Image (cartoon, rainbow, N blue to C red):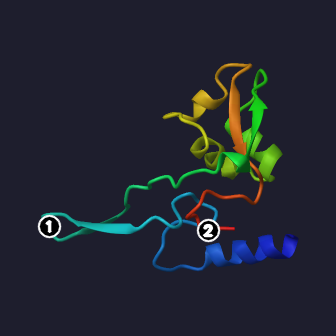
Amino acid sequence: MADIESYESALSAIPGAHPYPRSSRYHDAEIGVHRLPDGTEVRYAKRRLLPPLDVQATQEHVVGAGERADLLAQRFFGDPGQWWRIADANPVLDPRELTDEAGRVVEVPFAGVLPRGDRRV
């Protein structure tokens, strides 16, 4: 597993056309270019639409006092930066809503299971 992680890290460090690392939720987002009146090009990530999530590929977690999305991601995925996978699986606008109330039940995707249409591993 460490070999895969170091390989992924090495790939993420290679400069290229895509500004987001492979672990980012925006890695597969289409990049648009907006041209300012002075001709300057500004690159941006186009809107990211969430693919459907298979509810059979999630588990429920009851939020405890003091928990945060990044801490949940560390526990379930081994990477606090993957908090967005939990946010994507729940109907919230602000990821802080996931854990702002102890006792709330949140859906957590199983590690290694991605929404249909997501090509990342």
Q: Dot 1 lies on which element? A: loop
Amino acid carrying label 2: it is Arg
Residue 99 is marked as none
Q: Residue at x 18, y 63 (%)?
A: 36
Q: Residue at x 60, y 80 (%)?
A: 14
Q: Position of residue 108 (x, y in %)?
A: 71, 42
Quick one: 21 or 86, which is closer to the camera? 86
Residue 22 is marked as 2
Q: Quadrant of the N terminus?
A: bottom right
Q: Residue at x 51, y 60 (%)?
A: 26
Side of 47 where 86 appears, left or right: right
Q: Quadrant of residue 119?
A: bottom right
Of labels 1 and 2, the one closer to you: 2
Neighbor class of circle 1 (other Cα within 10 Å; few <14, some 14-19, many 20+) is few
Q: Earlier in the sequence, mark 1 or mark 2?
A: 2
Quick one: 78 or 92, which is closer to the camera? 92
Amino acid carrying label 1: it is Asp
Q: Dot 2 lies on which element? A: loop
Spatial CA distance of label 1 from label 2 is: 33 Å
Q: Position of residue 27 (x, y in %)?
A: 53, 65
Residue 38 is marked as 1
Neighbor class of circle 2 (other Cα within 10 Å; few <14, some 14-19, many 20+) is some
